[in-house]
Image (tube, rainbow, N blue to C red):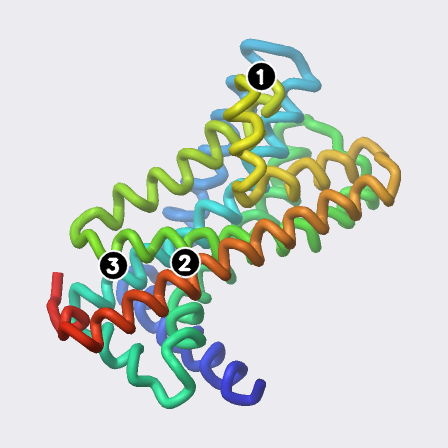
Amino acid sequence: MRHAVRIARESLVLGFAEMGAVYTWRTWTFGWLVRLLCQATFYALLGRYVGDEPTMRYVLVGNIVVLACMESTIVVISLAGERAMGTLPLLAIAPSGHLPVYLGRGLQWMVTGLTSSLVAWLVLPPLLGVPLPWPRALYAAPVIVLVLVSSYGYGCALAGVALRMRGVEWLVLNFAYGVVMTFGGVNVPIDVWPGPLRIAVNALPVVHGLEAVRGILDGAPPGHIMGLIGIEALVGACWYAVAALSMGRLVSVGRRDGSLDHAG
């Protein structure tokens, strides 16, 4: 546990140092964060245009929560960058094992994702005139954290594709986020999709966590909400298992044939 905490701390230091080379606090706040707020606002206003006030709230809540998924899956780019720079073998030979280092490589995106979602949660509803049931709406914050964590595992699992097929990391990232946003109940209920697709989307992160958030806002029974939270946690755990198996296979094969040394 001590090693895991140390790795997480060092990963955050490295991650924010990398971000500091790209952003200042001003450019992140007034560039990146404002861009995300505008995105959520756009979809909410579109929902109002094509529907009514409840539709607007449905879309706004979905787009605020999915910001956590969007940012946490940027771990795909962080991990692909290790291979492009030729530093992936260093992760594989870490004394603590490759997995903690691998999973910790994009932790800064979880911090920024949580910040973006919570700022949007506090700012956009009153700004757009969409009432939320305060203080009950505060109870959604831990669920957003769970969505963030499960989405990070999803991103780590899909990063395995970017590590094997070089040059596709942005395609993988946009596919990962786009699938969740399109089919995961963000803008339209999953009930509108055909049966097989409706079953398949239950394997995605966000789906059950977002439904739990909506349940909290609507005053659903606690048992129903806890069931959805449990499913979201299970889905996230499965994606972490896929990530662990994928990276383990990549490292095992790479050690045998030297492919870890090949920069993209």
Q: In x, y percent, where is residue 41?
A: 52, 30
Disc 2 from disc 3: Cα separation = 10 Å
Label 3 vs 1, first from the N-terminus: 3
Q: Residue at x 82, y 40 (%)?
A: 224
Label 1 vs 2, first from the N-terminus: 2
Q: Quadrant of the N terminus?
A: bottom right
* Label pair 2/3, CB-CB below 8 angstroms: no
Q: Which mark is residue 156?
A: 2
Residue 16 visible (yes or no)? no
Q: Is residue 165 left or right of residue 91?
A: left
* Label pair 1/2, CB-CB below 8 angstroms: no
Q: From the viewer's perspective, is residue 206 above or below residue 43?
A: below
Look at mark 3 in the image and give the residue it sits on: 163
| Circle 3 residues within 10 Å: few <14, some 14–19, many ≥20 | many
Q: From the viewer's perspective, is residue 133 above or below residue 16?
A: above
User: Quadrant location of residue 61?
Assistant: top right
Look at mark 1 in the image and give the residue it sits on: 192
Q: Residue at x 59, y 25 (%)?
A: 190
Q: Nearer the viewer, residue 84 or 12?
A: 84
Disc 3 from disc 1: Cα separation = 35 Å
User: Quadrant location of residue 220?
Assistant: top right
Amino acid type, mark 3: Leu
Q: In x, y percent, where is residue 233?
A: 64, 54
Label 2 vs 3, first from the N-terminus: 2
